[in-house]
Amino acid sequence: MAVAKSWTMVKHFDGAPKPEDFKLVERELPALKDGELLLESVFFTVDPYMRIFGSQIMKEGDITIRAQVPRLYRRRMMKEGDIMIGAQVARVTESKNPEFPVGGYYVGHGGWTTHFISDGKVLRALPSSWPESLSKSLAIGAAGMSGLTAYFGLLEVCSPKEGDVVLINSAAGAVGSLVGQIAKMKGCKVVGSAGSDEKVLYLKEIGFDEAFNYKTVSSLEEALKAASPEGYDCYFDNVGGKFTDAALQQMKDFGRIAVCGAISMYNDSVITSGPYIQPYILFKQLRMEGFLLSQWEDRYEEGHKQLLQWVLEGKLKYNEHITNGFENMPAGFMGMLKGENIGKAIIKV
């Protein structure tokens, strides 16, 4: 019998997650039934959304945000003692399902656990032609969920046109860094904001036209004006909060805003409110749209194929911030929330 090590959530996160909020447990997995397979995790992804589903304000019985979350996603909200949710690249080590041979690699959603049993229904196979030159971790990064979020969020929600000016915050992160490069492929001018001089340098290296460190500028409003005096046609928002309050003022008429995340507010214990945004949306005739990647589930194959092609052609550059060791998953997760990573945050077992 396989022994699985798993990271569980001891209690809902109140403010920034802390080491004591996690507990490492071991358990024996049962013998496989017909149609089941055993997988061993190789790479894990850690992402901001995990913070949301373990939030104190998301817990059962608290209606402040739960009522606003689609029913499909409420089922992912964690209870105290649950295994932390998340995806991984995993290898089949035992199988009683002929469609999933031993040795095959799949993207699964087993959570933060070294081994898990699946019936195969929600597994996505890595292509048999996966290039040996590419790490399989890209299947949960630039050629996986992060890439798909950038691909569909930018192209379908922002609908950039050649010559548009695109603004991206958290631009050196897993999604933002890819959004900027895709926008450049579409003939746009791209402006990025990041939280360190090292990240700003990285953005310039991957082709951003303008980039600035939002932590060191004297005025966010002036920094946005300096980067694009004519304003912005598209805004890909990963941060929310005060950044968005400032960005809306810089939008051109008929601008498009894709709301991908709001990481600046994920650690808030109380839901905050900002300036009223309706006048900007009304008089500039803006379109502001939140999106969840799942709405394009029927087009994932298209996205995977295009992203992988761009990576192989060298048109889509990526960086992986690797944390080694399953025992270091909480540290890797907390570091990602603090912005310690450039590009995709990955845990390597």
Image: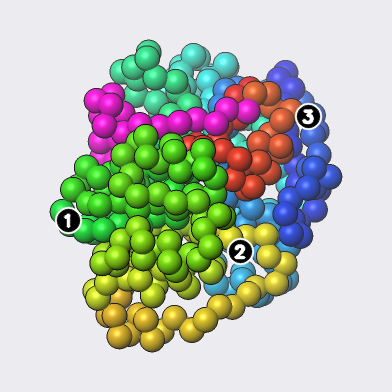
Q: Quadrant of residue 157?
A: bottom left
Q: Judge depth for marks 3 and 1 and give the one in front.
A: 1
Q: Is residue 164 magenta?
A: no
Residue 39 in the image, given as x and y percentages of width and height: 58, 24
Residue 94 in the image, given as x and y percentages of width and height: 57, 17
The label number, if any, that marks residue 265 in the structure image: 2
Query: Considering the numbered disc 1 on the image, is that residue within a helix, a strand or a loop?
Result: loop
Q: CA distance from mark 2 to mark 1?
A: 32 Å
Categorize mark 3 by other alpha carbons within 10 Å: few (<14), some (14-19), many (20+): few
Q: Quadrant of residue 16?
A: bottom right
Amino acid type, residue under disc 1 in the picture:
Gly
Q: Which residues are magenta?
A: 297-323
Residue in the image at 20% along x and 47% along y: 186
157 left or right, relative to 82:
left
Residue 211 in the image, given as x and y percentages of width and height: 40, 49
The residue singled out by tag 1 in the image is 163
Looking at the image, do the residues carrying marks 2 and 3 touch, with CB atoms under 8 Å apart? no
Categorize mark 1 by other alpha carbons within 10 Å: few (<14), some (14-19), many (20+): few
Q: CA distance from mark 3 to mark 1?
A: 56 Å
Residue in the image at 30% along x and 85% along y: 283
Amino acid type, residue under disc 2 in the picture:
Met
Say which quadrant the C terminus sits in: top right
Query: Considering the numbered disc 3 on the image, is that residue within a helix, a strand or a loop?
Result: strand
- The colouring scheme, among rainbow, by chain, secondary structure or one colour, is rainbow
Q: Judge depth for marks 2 and 1 and give the one in front.
A: 1
Say which quadrant the N terminus sits in: top right
